[in-house]
Amino acid sequence: SVVAGAVARCVGWLERLSARSFDRIVAVTEDIARYFPTNKTIVIKNYVSLKMIDGIKPAETGNSGTVVIYAGRLSRKRGIAEIVAAMEFTGEGTELWLAGKWDSTAFEEECKRLDGWKRTRYLGALPVEDVYRYMKVASMGLHCVYLNDYYVTGLPTKVFEYAACSVPVVMTRCARWEELFGEFAVFVDPGDPQDIARGITGLARDHERGQYMGRKAREFVGRQYNWELE
């Protein structure tokens, strides 16, 4: 909207003005860093802490089927309605776990009216330690967001969290992400619940492939993309 654009420009101006008085500036990506003076800006990427995650015990759920998890803000832009809808097409024995805060009560009720909700379990807004406990026992993680400039150029923290928990990912098709995460991710159209379901069921049916991709995911974050090395 016009108002949102005006606010964004004002905030950007205030950031640049404030930057003149800062001794040092820390940015989490190179794209953010380029807006600030190079002589006092450093990039420290917000990767996951393997030490913290490795110290957390997996949850005891008693679920022996295929568990698909999404943890984070439950909003329309993050494709939550579509991943719930996708559950209608995944077949028996597959369950979606959602953890996080709903964007609004109206959106929550909209998702609950979808046929896929009968295969969805809402875990609530959990402390991060509990989120990782559930991630560790999931079959795969979801990151089926609608793309914008931030998602394309930024770093999807959620994917690094799944990878640190040795979980393969079903995520939005994007050339940059396919290059970066191709070893352990399946790529889908976030606007097509049936395509999301195909990604889920394809991975669920090939258990050995899922385990292999989970190992590759963990190797990926262990090699470079973790807080300890950063």
Image (cartoon, rainbow, N blue to C red):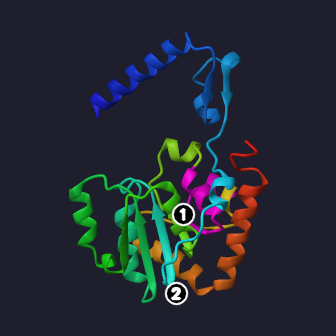
N-terminal-most mark, 2 or 1: 2
Taking the spot 62% from the left edge, 69% from the top edge, the residue there is 168
Residue at the right extreme of this rendering: 223
Residue 174: x and y in percent read: 57, 56
Q: Amino acid at mark 1?
A: Met
Viewer-closest of 103 and 133: 133
Numbered disc in front, either 2 or 1: 2
Mark 2 residue crowding within 10 angstroms, few (<14) / some (14–19) / many (20+): few
How far apart in space, not on screen, are marks 2 and 1 (Cα)?
23 Å
Mark linked to residue 171: 1
Mark linked to residue 132: none
Viewer-closest of 161 and 125: 125
Indicate left or right for 104 with 156 as reference.
left
- The quarter of the rendered structure image containing the N terminus is top left
- The quarter of the rendered structure image containing the C terminus is top right
Residue 154: x and y in percent read: 57, 43
Judged from the image, the secondary structure of the residue bearing numbered disc 1 is: strand
Quickly name the residue at label 2: 64
Mark 1 residue crowding within 10 angstroms, few (<14) / some (14–19) / many (20+): many
Taking the spot 38% from the left edge, 20% from the top edge, the residue there is 10
Is 169 one of the magenta-colored residues? yes
Residue 187 versus residue 63 in the image, above or below: above
Residue 141 versus residue 206 in the image, above or below: above
Residue 200: x and y in percent read: 52, 77
Viewer-closest of 92 and 57: 57
Q: Amino acid at mark 2?
A: Ser
Residue 4 visible, this orientation: yes
Judged from the image, the secondary structure of the residue bearing numbered disc 2 is: loop
Magenta span of residues:
156-179
Indicate left or right for 187 with 14 as reference.
right
Taking the spot 75% from the left edge, 57% from the top edge, the residue there is 222
